[in-house]
Amino acid sequence: MVHDPGDAVAALILLHDRARGGRAGPNSMWTRMARELAELGFVVLRFDYSRERDGFVIGRGLESSARPGLRVDLDLQLLREVGSWFWERVPGLELFVVGSCFGASTAVGWAREQPDVAGMFLVVPWLRTLQERLGEKDGGERDGDARPDGLSGRMVDAFDDALTHMPAWILVGEHELPDVQALRRALPQRAQQFDVVVVPGMALYPPHYPDTQAVVREHLMRRLERVVAAAPGSAA
Amino acid sequence: MHDAPRWSQAAGWTGDGLRREVFFFESGGVRLYGSLYAAAEPVRPVGVVVCPSWGNEADRGDRLAHGIACGMADLGGAGVVFDYPGYGDSAGDPEAMTMDALAAAASDACAAGAARFPDAGWIVAGLMFGASVACLGAARAAAGGLLLVQPSLSPSAYLDRVQRSANRSNLSGELQERVAYGYALPRGLDEAGPELDASVAAALETFRGRGACVRYADTPKRDPDPDQLELVEAPGRWRFGAKAYPELAAAARGWLDRSTRDSEAVGSG
């Protein structure tokens, strides 16, 4: 789904979390926000992940017992293809990526390969291993990827690569701060390249409760308004 | 905002024997979102419109809804999934939703499907709460087929049950009024109560086409199985809010396959 104001000053890919119905009910914030961002001046792309809604046929043959990493790989490949398609259609505009939770992790995995992306905005990125998130019940193999500090080695590497060519803005609740602090310690050479905004006294994960979403929306919109104001061609 | 020419051509795609198209259609002055699966080379002139369940259960059941629509396309026909007013990518106010608007949406989805997959007979399918919508929508669209999957044929009882379930899962002790799992309960549905249930029963009673009720063999006995429809039991036990319902999907597809081999049987009612 593309939200195009017709006179956009910047482009943005919005990657919601993997909760079902990222477009409705408690999660309709992402749909509403895409529309609001278009009014602000972004041309916005959002899409369904593999096996969800209009992404139903993507990875259709995948067994439900398949290693969780396979779906992550599939969604990253999907983002590569859809992202390229989108980017070709917004020539001359700076492209940003916004991701929430699972979407934030996917955004970082993609951004590391995209030196021309202008920046990433991440809401409670999942920095630990998939195994820790999904558990044995999902039939996953052990990632064997966990670092002594609890972070996923793959995620730390992806951040390291992505931050070589773009800045990141990270929004977390106070309860999720330790993982972001660990990321700063893991990447001291990149510490100046990401801003961390902490919402005191809150956990922003899971990100699909209305009160949490209101806080996320407020912070994210405020930050993205600044992006539009600074964009080439902006009237602001 | 959504359909600038440079994007609209991306609304359709054909590959691997499947034609996909996403589109908007009008219903009661509101723009609704639809998603079509069709055989690239149709061999069965049959389409199925899937009415999802409501709220959280619609979210959780999206794979079943799309699976049924895609399954009909695999069989050589077509399937349409649509978003109710105020849900997903459809416009409208979810709190102001009425059963009449839902039935009209189902009927208009049939018309939107027929415009994209012409010369077909249409089956209206409904999942859980959506089964009630399907009964009313099939009557309104004069559809020749009706497929009820794990049906809840009393909308008022369904919404009451979902709200109680949501409140049970809220351990804070604060009971939420008119909200279930973050979804606002539609005022019009709640207030119509028994009258609404009677209209669903009447629509089912007067249905004269080919139809089935597909449900898990182990299902809490709330509503009697509709005796004018073929009963298809899927192995296993019903569970609210499951991630996937593979047995229901297989049983529904099996019935679609059997009942549409002779596609003459699914004419318009």
Image (cartoon, coloured by chain):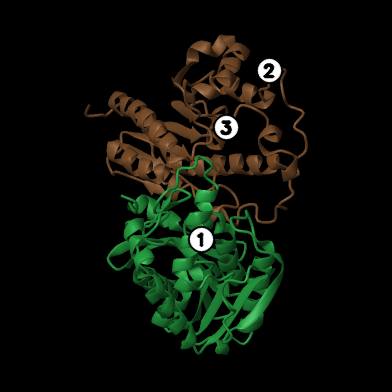
Q: Which residue is mark 2?
A: A149
Residue type at tag 1: Arg
Determine the secondary structure under disc 1.
helix
Q: Position of residue A73 (x, y in %)?
A: 65, 40
Amino acid type at image mark 2? Asp
Same subunit, labels 1 and 3: the answer reads: no
- How many callouts does the rendering have? 3
Cβ atoms at labels 2 and 1 below 8 Å apart = no
Q: Position of residue A12 (x, y in %)?
A: 41, 36
Vertical relation: B104 (above or below) A75: below
Which residue occupies 35% across, 31% down?
A218
Quarter containing the C terminus of chain A: top left
Q: Work out how far the residue at label 2 is from the one at label 1, CA to CA, in angstroms.
A: 45 Å
Farthest residue to the front: give it: B173
State the residue at coordinates (59%, 17%): A183
Using the rendered image of the protein, determine whether residue B91 is visible from the camera's viewpoint.
no
Mark 1 sits on what residue? B161
**C-alpha distance separating marks 1 and 3:** 37 Å
Which chain does the numbered disc 2 sit on? A
Chain (green): B
In the image, which is nearer the foreground, mark 1 or mark 3?
Answer: 1
State the residue position of label 3.
A105
**Label 3: which secondary element:** helix
Q: Give amino acid for label 3.
A: Ser
Are the residues under marks 2 and 1 on the same chain?
A: no
Q: Do marks 3 and 2 share a subunit?
A: yes
Q: Which chain is brown?
A: A
